[in-house]
Image (spheres, rainbow, N blue to C red):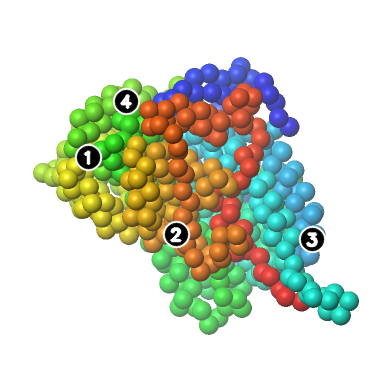
Amino acid sequence: MIDRNVYITYNDTGCVDSMSHAYSVNHCHETRHITASTLEDVPIIIGSEEFRTNNVRHQVMPHNHSKQIAKFYWADKKLVEKAIKTATETQVKWDRTPISERIKIWQKAADLMAGPYRAELNAATMLGQAKTVIQAEIDSAAELIDFIRMNTVYLKEATKYQPISENSKVTKNSLRFRGIDGFIAAVSPFNFTAIGGNLAYTPALMGNGVLWKPSDTALLSNYVIFKIMREAGVPPGVVNFIPTDGPVFGDTITASPHLAGINFTGSVPTFNRLWRQVGENINIYNNFPRLIGECGGKNYHFVHPSADVQSVVNGTIRSSFEFCGQKCSACSRMYVPESLWPQVKEGLIKTRDTLKIGDVTDFSTFTSAVIDDKAFNRIKSYIDHAKSSKNLEIIAGGKCDDSKGYFIEPTIVQSNDPKDKIMTEEIFGPVLSIYVYKDKDLDQTMKLVGNSTRFALTGAVFSKDEAFLKRALEEFKLTAGNFYLNDKSTGSVVGQQPFGGGRMSELDFALSRKMCGPRTTVRSTLWLAGEAVDLLEELDSAFRQRMCGPRMNQKARFSSRLAGRRSMRLWKSWILLSAE
C-alpha cells in the first residue's frame, strides 16, 4: 500500500520545501474536486438506514466562507433515541465477533486510509478545517492511520495477559475481555480529524456500540472516515453517525439507562454539563458510565536564561501559530528572562513576519483561517482587550479580517501582568502572550506557571543548564501532562509521548496497565539531549521523520508510526475484564 514515489518534505520553519509530483497531483486533484463539485450530501446514519431531517446545515470553508462543501442534517431527539436502541442491540452480536476478525477489519481500514483514500482524507481536512497540506498530512493521514493500526496492537497486548493458575489440572483461572453492555457516546472536536476517528472507533474495536457525534465544522472529513470504516467491514449499527445539536445529543444520551460511557474532546463547560447530567441521573443507569474527557489548555513555554534563542524562537513560532494555534497542545503563554528578551523578541517578530497566511490550496501557505465565526469573534475579543489594556502591548500582528475567510494574523502580545486574562484563559487561536521576568525572579516566576491557570495539558522548558532541567521536571510536574525539555509543546508522537493532561485539562481513566492503572496521573516527558546549539538540526530531523515522512529518509509518508497519541489513554476504558 506504500508508494515510495509519493512524498513531501519541508524546511526548518515548517513550510513546504519539496514534494513529489505524484503527491502534488493527487492532493491538487482532490482539493479541486471537492471545491468544484456539488455539495456532498451527508446523511444521518443509523444502522443501515440513512435519514435526512428538515433541520439542514452546511459546512463551509473557513478560508472562503462563501463556499459550502457539505450539506448535512441535524438529528432530533427521536433519531438519537433510535440510534441508542440500534447501537445497544448491535453491541451484543458485535461483541461476539472474534477479536482477530475485528483486528483484520481495522488493518484493512488503515490500508485504505494509507492508500486509495489518503488524498481524499487530506483534501477534506484541508478544505473543511483550513489545514495546510502539511498539517492535514500530519493529522488525517499519519496520525489517523497510527490510531487505527496501533489500537489493534494494544488490544492484542491486553488479551495476552492471563492470571496464574497454580495447578491447571485442578483449577484454571482466566480473563475474558468484552465490551460494555449499552452504548458509548463519542463526541469529537473540529481540530483533529484523527481524534474523531479515534474517539469513535477505539470503543468499537473493543466490542462496543457507538453513537458518534461529529463536530459540525469537521463534518466532511469525519464522514469520509465513517465511509472508509464501513468499506473495511465494520457492520452497520456498530458506529452510528449522528450530526446533531449538542444539547439535544447530551440530554438524550444522559437520560438513557443504557449509557455506558462518554468519550469526549471539547470545551470544559460542555464536559462539565455532561458530567453534571450523568451525576443527576446516576440512579437510572445499568452501568456506572465511564467518562473520558480532554478539555482545555493554557500551554506554556518557559525560557531559562541559559536557553538557545534560535531553538526558542523556532519552537515557539511553530507551537503557537501552526494551524492558527488551534491544536490542543499549542503554546499560548510564554515566560522569558529579561536578559534574553531583546534577542527573543527580535527573533519572534522577524520569523512571524515571514509567515505566509492564506488559502490552504496554496501549498506554500504556513497557516490559514480559524475555524468559524464564533472562534473568530472570541479570539478577536482577546486582541481587542490587548489593544485597550494599559498592561498589554501588541508587538506583532493584531489584524483581523472576516470578509472572505476567518483570518486572524499570528499575534504576539507582551504582558506586564502575569495574571491578566490573556495570560490565564484559553484562547484557542493564534495569540501568543509573553511575560518578561527579571532573571533574579526565576523562582517566583516558576510558581506563576502553575498558579495562573487551572489547566495542565502541555508545557515546555528551554535551557542548556541540565541541573535546571532536572529541577524543572520536579517543579513543573503538576503543570502539564505532556512535558517537553528543549522542544516545543506540540507534536506528540503516537506511543512515544502518550497524550494527556491533568487538572481541568483532562479526565483520564484509560491508562495502560503498564502505567499504573486508573488511580494515578501519568506525565509524558520528551527530553532533547545534547548541546542546545545542535537542537535546530535535531528538531528539523525529528520533525521531518515523525511528521512528514514515514520516514523522511525513505521519502515516503505512508506507514504508521509505531504508537498512539491518544490511543494509549483511550483503549483500556472500553473493555471489561471478567475473572472466570
Residue type, mark 4 in image: Thr
Residue 7 vertical position relative to residue 570 in the rendered view, above or below: above
* Image spot of residue 49 (x, y percent): 69, 55
Earlier sequence position, callout 3 versus callout 1? 3
- Cβ atoms under marks 3 and 4 closer than 8 Å: no
Gap in angstroms between the C-alphas marked 4 and 1: 20 Å
Tell me the residue that label 1 is attached to: 337
- Cβ atoms under marks 2 and 4 closer than 8 Å: no
Give SS at disc 1: strand
Q: Nearer the viewer, mark 1 or mark 2?
A: 1
Tell me the residue that label 4 is attached to: 351
Residue 61 vertical position relative to residue 273 in the rendered view, above or below: above
Which image quadrant: the N terminus?
Answer: top right
Q: Is residue 186 in view?
A: no
Label 1 neighbourhood size at 10 Å, few (<14), some (14-19), many (20+)? many
In the rendered view, does 150 fall on the left or right side of 104?
left
Residue type, mark 3 in image: Thr
Tell me the residue that label 2 is attached to: 506
Earlier sequence position, callout 2 versus callout 3? 3
